[in-house]
Image (tube, rainbow, N blue to C red):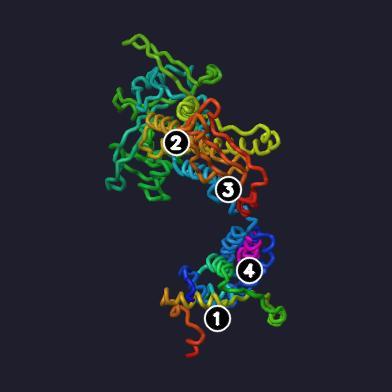
Amino acid sequence: MNLLRFIRSRRVPLAILHSAAWFVPVVQRMEWLAEWKAELWHICDNCERKEQDQPGDMQQATMFCLGAFKDAFWLRWESPTSTFSEIFELRSPWRCIALLAGLAIIAGALAIYLPGVRKVILPSPYSNPQNLVLISPSGHISDPFPAIPLASFQSWKNNTHDLFNGMAFYRPTTARIVVGGHPGPEISVALASDNLFRVLGIPADFSIPKRQVNAERLVLSHSAWKKYFHDDPNITGKIVQIAGQKALVVGVIADDLWRLPGRIDACLLEDAHAMAALPPDSDGYVVADVKASDFPPPTNGQWQMSVPDPDIGSGNYDCVSLTERSKQPMFCFLFALALACLTLPATTSLPLGEYSENYTHTHEGNETRRWIFLAAKLALILVIVGLASLDLAHFSASINSLIAEYIQLGSSLCGFLFAFRWALHDQRRRCPKCLRLLTHPAYVGQSSRNFLGWNGTELICVGGHGLLHIPDMPTSWFSTQRWLYLDASWSSLFSDAYVGLL
Amino acid sequence: MEVEAKLSHTAAMILHAIHAGNVYGFSVMEVTGLPSGTVYPAMRRLERDGLISSRWEQQSIAEQQQRPVRKYYKLTRTGKATLESLYKRYPLLSRMIPLPEVNRA
């Protein structure tokens, strides 16, 4: 109640005004605040007169005061000593960093919004992901399709008590769901052994008694519950028909909880009897909880399992921990980065230009600033390309894991190459003192007289700090771009406004 | 010589509202229906361009009425000339907010 009273009091609009006042230049701040406060007083007075039944409701006043920010920003922008105009000026280094930071924020926001990317970047929700393994035939770790027959699972389940604490099977498929006799849409269902969530270590109790109904248990994903059951709060305990059998809805799990291969809308937990009714050659995934005390995890997070097979002698299987699988996008990212670093010299020149040694010794701060600026650009590029490639790879839920890896690898490699090339080019075209982009390119010299003089392009810093010569034809004495510093005697030729800002 | 009128419709509306006797920000907001975030920066721009001028009212008047001192705006000579040319560009402008003379008639 106190909070409500506070919100409805005059304090909130006043607090907004005082916050906005921080953006107003100091010389104008007092007068600006006085004007807005005087107007606010009249609005509050007006509100109180109009709304006798709701005295103190300051909604109109709050809305009025929010406009003060726009006014304050405008004054800051217009101020001759403003850093705002410098920040958003086209050639400013701040604008460059702000743009890159903006892109990074957009890529990050998209990553949080997309469920596929969330699953990659957020930590595993399972209790012991380093001990949880996904079993696949040897050499087929990355295969996006299920490859373990149900018969093998049933055989292993009974014979591997000394290797695993538990073992579960699931088979992704599609099935039509029927609710209340009305046929619904086809959804992705995992036909799973009833111990699946227990093996994964998800702390959820789906052991609702089956009442008198002979039905399997169905766990819905949050998105499926929203999409197909319209957020029905009484969904638990309802009977639906799925894959030709009755199922009792026992719960809804968050989408982020499913980190196993395959897109799943619902999970049908079947007991041993129902599992036995499935064809023995039905392929699925097998998840197991390794006895870590007996089998410490190897450095690559991968165990080898050999199973005697009467037909082929012995079958070899890879048991890859879920932690290791979740590192795959990071490996892709690092691989693309390494590849881009190796390829970059073939696509662009790496030197950043020649700068007079005398000058750099006396202005070490400028040199440091240049490197910090380049480092900031590269760091932001890593974030942008890393997140954007993940966004692209997991944009649609229908993209399987293998294709997603290829998309991530390809897009991040292209992204890194393009972005690094741009970062170096941008760095070469900036004034070493103020880091603004150089302007006014002018062609100088004549190619036909190359041995008598030099020819190339000349750019200038609008702040009057110097000129950049870029040779058209690299020679042994003039191979790379060269910076010529202008001393203070040149300052009278340049705009005071620009010089004053620097 | 005719004054070049290159103001937006919003700026013209604010200029006309001030001319119509709405001499402070909140009253301009009320008659134009524009939010404070539009009206105040626009008035600052008009003042910067010399089309309106501002002055603080006398402290004694405000004290007498037990309220804070307000800042009033009025059109300059250039502002009036600009507004005249704006009426030609935006013919419906004068009908949106009637001038005091029209009210009296």
Q: Amino acid at mark 1?
A: Gly
Which of the 4 image quarters holds residue A51?
Answer: bottom right
Q: Are marks 3 and 1 on the same chain?
A: no
Is residue A326 visible from the viewing direction of this image?
Answer: no
Do the numbered discs 1 and 4 sit on residues whose CB atoms are within 8 Å? no
In the displayed structure, does residue A150 sit left or right of residue A119? left
Please, what secondary structure does the residue beneath circle 4 have? helix
Task: Work out how far the residue at label 2 is from the one at label 4, CA to CA, in angstroms.
Answer: 47 Å
Give the residue pinned by disc 2: A389
Task: Work out how far the residue at label 4 is from the one at label 3, CA to CA, in angstroms.
Answer: 39 Å
Give the residue pinned by disc 3: A462
Chain ID at mark 2: A
Task: Work out how far the residue at label 3 is from the one at label 1, CA to CA, in angstroms.
Answer: 46 Å
Do the numbered discs 1 and 2 sit on residues whose CB atoms are within 8 Å? no
Give, as a single range, the part of the protein colored magenta: A7-20
Q: Position of residue A364 (x, y in %)?
A: 68, 36
Give the residue pinned by disc 1: B21
Above or below A50: residue A17: above
Q: Are marks 1 and 2 on the same chain?
A: no
Task: Work out how far the residue at label 2 is from the one at label 3, CA to CA, in angstroms.
Answer: 37 Å
Chain ID at mark 3: A
Q: Amino acid at mark 3?
A: Val
Residue at the spot 42% in from the left edge and 76% down from the top edge: B88
Chain ID at mark 4: A
Looking at the rendered image, the disc whose residue lies closer to the viewer, 1 or 4, is 1
Which of the 4 image quarters holds residue A246?
Answer: top left
Residue at the spot 30% in from the left edge and 23% down from the top edge: A280
Is residue A461 visible from the viewing direction of this image?
Answer: yes
Residue at the spot 64% in from the left edge and 47% down from the top edge: A490
Number of residues whose C-alpha sits closer than 10 Å to that of mark 1, classed few (under 14), some (14–19) or many (20 or more)? some
Please, what secondary structure does the residue beneath circle 1 have? loop
